[in-house]
Image (tube, rainbow, N blue to C red):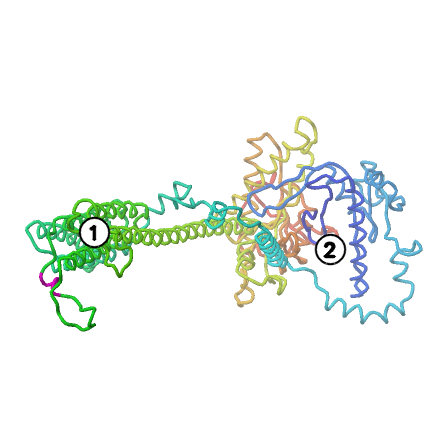
Amino acid sequence: MRIKILGDCYYCVSGLPVSRPSHASNCVRMGLQMIEAIRVVRQATEVNVDMRIGVHTGNVLCGVIGLRKWQYDVWSDDVTLANHMESGGVPGRVHITKATYHQLDGKFEAEPGNGHLRDNYLSDRQVQTYLISPQTQKGKTTDDIALKDDGNRHRSMSKMYKHVECWGADKPFSNISESMLAKNVGLTSLGLVEANLLPGAENFWSSCRQCTPEGLSPFLLRFYDSGLESQFHAQADPQFPQHAAVSALLFAAIIIIQLLTLTLNLMIVSVLASAAMVVGILTVATWTRQCQAAETERTTLSSRFSPNLATNIVLRIIIFLTTTLFILTATFVNMITSGSVTGITASMGFNDTSMSHSRVVMTEADTDYGLIRYQQLCAMLALTAVFVFLRINFMLKLAMMAIGLLSFSLAFTGLRPDLYEVPLEPNEGFSNVPFSACTVFFLAFYVVVLHILDRQAEYTARVDFLSCAKLRVEQEDLETMGSINKILLENILPAHVASHFLNNSRFSEELYHERYSSVAVMFASIPNYIEFYDETDVNKQGLECLRLLNEIICDFDKVLLKPKFSVIEKIKTIGSTYMAAAGLHPGREENGEKPREEHNVVSLVEFALTLMAILEQINRESFQRFKLRIGINHGPVIAGVVGAQKPQYDIWGNTVNVASRMDSCGVIGRIQVTEDTANTLQGCGYECECRGSTYVKGKGTLVTYFLKTQFDRNVSFTKL
């Protein structure tokens, strides 16, 4: 597992998070393969580059510290020893300790490493080391083969260059879309296979369960989740006024038919008038909001009543019940109070014998047939008036239609046999069956058809609601996951870099990088933390020490939340070292804006002084004597994201290397800067003290300066 990248140092472990017996051999093999990869690059580019690799076996504490730029890391004395195994190693060899050597069980040929001659830390602790070389055919090393035939090497150089030109490592985040697509395709294919392999329904009940969406009762069509059921009934019904209007029109048709076909009396007129008045008032009330939508103030009772109609299920049910009850009642009462058909209806007919449209006088039987047919039509219209309220629960409508059917059946068969007990005509078949019984059967069949349609409409509405509810939940989950991913990504990468990868749908097109001409870089370490760190039972094998380091780093991270430090970006933590940079603004250099190097340097210095003040406060609260050793430099850097499996944002360049050396060769409690940075600070009113020529590892002798601060011993802080 790769832990992090420290400049040109690759930091990895084996045995985490799951312990592996082969962790030692895994690390050695990894080291040998890295050496081989570097050898290929060295031969292809003719650049003298190689790797030192150090391996040690021991115990570690692993986890994440700080509030920002989270990075999985490991800490322990054995980790420190492994770092010195690398620095005390030999290029092109794997440098291992005695503890690792015993774990290999003779799988690799090793020779004495003499690491104590190259590193004081190894010498002080008398660590016995070994070296492992990459092996090739006949026991020869890769370097021997590389130097065997220079002529052959130069002849194959053109092929190697072509290999390097067409070769490219995986880009950061390039594997996300492909892996997710493969996973989704795999899951989808498996789902299709399982669906096709499902056995057929063994009976009707299992068939119903398969056809009904999960969470919906197959027969009652109710959600098992009471919350979903309440939400479904709480839905608005903007088309309810139209349904009420259609129902009123159907009742109007009933009134017209009965006025034209029945012998009118006071009872019929009273019933029709009262029912028409109630239905009309309710219909007008439901339409008030649409008709008066342009008015800003409504004062009438109906206008106060209507706005809540679309969202109030109780009001809609009351209107539905009232309207349908009056329609059914009026139709039923007129059925049992009518005496006979009117003369107008009796005079209308056809001569079936001659097929001519001549008007004849109907017999008493013809009159009875006409009455029952018109009443049958009125009953159908009344039942349809119940059906047209599409968004009312289908079981409630079934109950209303059942009441209507029962009432009409009593009217046709029991209450007025003198009007409706008429046998069928001989040419119609079943001549002994009363015509009223056929009418009741027909009405029952009509109710069943209407109920089936109601049930289908209810099923469709509930499935649509369930699909929308699931879609909303999925969208909310997706938004939540997107927010979490953004937060996590912004805690790994800077905000502008995270936005680049989140908004770019094609991650693998190019390697993300930015070039800056002037960036201030700071390394702030706590050298005496190593003395404080102690792996004893009192400190829970170092866990309590690590807990205090986490508190320190968290307090440092909180400082970055202040607006005046908005130009500063935390890069990473390296053990007890805090790395930050100022001036990493995307696009500033490309847009031609003048670098704000003075502002960057001053902001980073103020940030460093704040960290020193915070550490002093922590010392007072924890009774410790921690001191910061800080190195600052500014200049051009290259920023980018590297790593395909664990992308990491970092900055590179001579500026970064020198800033790191300003820390490592600095003095505890002081801020050391380069000569150019000191000149910039002095121009901004800060006082610097020349340290003189200082040997810097890898850079030779440099003239460095100490920044005078209030934390200097025996040095008064003054600002010019």
Which marked residue is nearer to the observer: mark 2 or mark 1?
1
Q: Nearer the viewer, residue 403 or 293?
A: 403
Mark 2 lies on a secondary structure that is loop
Residues under numbered marks 2 and 1 in contact, where contact means CB atoms less than 8 Å apart: no
Q: Nearer the viewer, residue 134 or 213?
A: 213
**Can I make out residue 22 in this image?**
yes
Looking at the magenta stretch, what is its main secondary structure? Answer: helix
Identify the residue under disc 2.
699
Q: Is residue 546 left or right of residue 229?
A: right
For label 2, the crowd category at 10 Å Cα-Cα, with few meaning under 14, some 14 to 19 and many 20 or more, is: few
**Can I make out residue 676 in this image?**
no
Residue type of the residue flagged with mark 1: Ser
Q: Return the residue found at the far left.
A: 266
Q: Is residue 706 magenta?
A: no
Position of residue 354 relative to residue 442, above or below, is below
Mark 1 lies on a secondary structure that is helix
User: Magenta span covers which residues?
Assistant: 343-347
Identify the residue under disc 1.
306
For label 1, the crowd category at 10 Å Cα-Cα, with few meaning under 14, some 14 to 19 and many 20 or more, is: many
Residue at the image position 87 percent from the left and 62 percent from the top: 146
